[in-house]
Each structure stands twice: as C-alpha cells, then as structure tokens.
Amino acid sequence: MTASKESEIERIVQTLVNAIAQRRLKPGQRIVESKIVEILNANRNHVQVALKQMALANIVHIERNKGAFVSQPSAKEARDVFAARRVVELGILEQITPEKINTYQKELTTHIEEESLTIEKGDPHKIVLILTSFHRLLAKVSENSVLMDILDNLLIRSSMIEMLYSRNAVPSCASCEHKNILSALQEGDNKKAVELMVKHIEEIEEHLILVDEKETSFDLADALNAI
Ligand SMILES: [Zn+2]
C-alpha cells in the first residue's frame, strides 16, 4: 500500500471513529458507502478498505448485500469490554513511574484544566471526548504503544456501549476521579491509583442498564460534517 493511500484510509477511519466516539454516529446506524465517498470526498476503494479495517476492530460490522453498520454491542460484550478495560488500564498504571509523570507533567496538567473548562461549557459531545482522552493520555504516559492500541479500541467500544446502555445522557466518568488518580500517580502511589481506577471503571459500568435503545433517526452528513 502506498503512503498516500495509507494516510487517506487513516483519515477516513479517524473521521468515522471520531464520529462514533463523540456519539454522533450511533450503534446500529447504517454507514452508506456512497455517502461517505461523497461527504468525505474520498475514493470508493479507500472507503471500503477503511470499513474493513474497522470491522476487524469490531467497531463496525459488514452485512453481505446490506453494507456496513456501527456495531451494536450486546450486554455480554459490554461486560467483556469493561472487564478487558480493567485489565488493560491497570496494566498501563503499573508501567507509569514518577519519572514518566514528570516527562508528561505539562500535558497532564493542561488536560485536567481542559476537562474542567469543557464540563463547565456543557457540550456533551466534547465532554465525552475529553473524558475519554484522559485514559488515552495515561496510555501515552506509560509509553507502551501496544497497550495504547488495545486501549484505543476498547475506548471506542466503551463509548458505543455507553451510548446504548447509559442511564442518562451525562457521561458518568467524572473529572474529579481523574484528578485523584493523577495525584496518586504523582505521589508514586501506584497501588492507590490502581484502586481508584478500579472504582472509576466500576462506576462507569454501574451507570449502564441493559435495555434496547429507542429508535431514532440520524443524518450521516450532519454527523460527519460536525467534526
Ligand atoms: Zn474516566
């Protein structure tokens, strides 16, 4: 694959993944290939490869003669994703040292400040994005790119699960819990950070109820153009 083709596919994947992570594209929604070609001004073949890559990561599923759909995780898959998050995120915390925290200190502080500001402004899409990116930032601080890739996939799937099963529209993942996890890591108390993270992930999971989501209508162009 040429570098330009690869980066074009990456652009399409990222746009669709962002739309799913920001809850603009919903679980079960059909992704019409020809519309993606038009909206993103992309090559049809590139869109097909992008959708196949997303299907491999279980973010979309492709039905023969029907096309691609945003995955609709079952309740069992939802529990499995959260169980996997616990394992992966605790693994990430174990690899964070006070030295690594020092290296990323500025980025971490800025992130926490941005969380507060974004929550104050109240745009739910932006809140989801910033709260999720705290977990991604910790993966970056761990400097383990494999764990980071695995977590990326789990976070997108978590976001889809929260869309389907959340008790309320407000994200349950609270910023003050992030602050406490970070403080424990800054103090070099990884044991405490692990305990806080377990509780934090449990809390997100506790906000889920296993009911079918109501049918709603979506506009694909709106979802992709708003990014
Ligand atoms: Zn969180």
Image: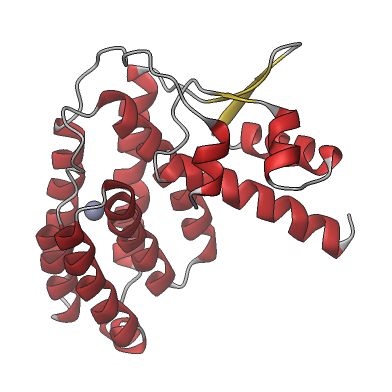
Exactly how many numbered labels are in the figure? Answer: 0
The x and y percentages for residue 35 are 70, 32
171 left or right of 22 in image: left
Identify the residue at horizontal 20%, vertical 75% (top origin): 113
Q: Nearer the viewer, residue 94 or 72?
A: 72
Residue 58 seen in the current view: no
The x and y percentages for residue 54 are 63, 38
The x and y percentages for residue 154 are 43, 43
User: What's the image's color scheme?
Assistant: secondary structure
138 left or right of 205 in image: right
In the image, is residue 221 above or below residue 22?
A: above
Residue 80: quarter of image: top left
In the orientation shown, which residue stands out farthest toward the right? Answer: 2
The x and y percentages for residue 168 are 16, 31
Q: Nearer the viewer, residue 140 or 48?
A: 48
Identify the residue at horizontal 37%, vertical 34% (top origin): 81
**Image quarter (top left, top right, bottom left or bottom right) of the N terminus:** bottom right
In the image, is residue 142 above or below residue 63?
A: below
Residue 92 seen in the current view: yes
In the image, is residue 162 above or below residue 21?
A: above
Identify the residue at horizontal 37%, vertical 50% (top origin): 88
Q: Nearer the viewer, residue 223 or 52?
A: 223
208 left or right of 135 in image: left
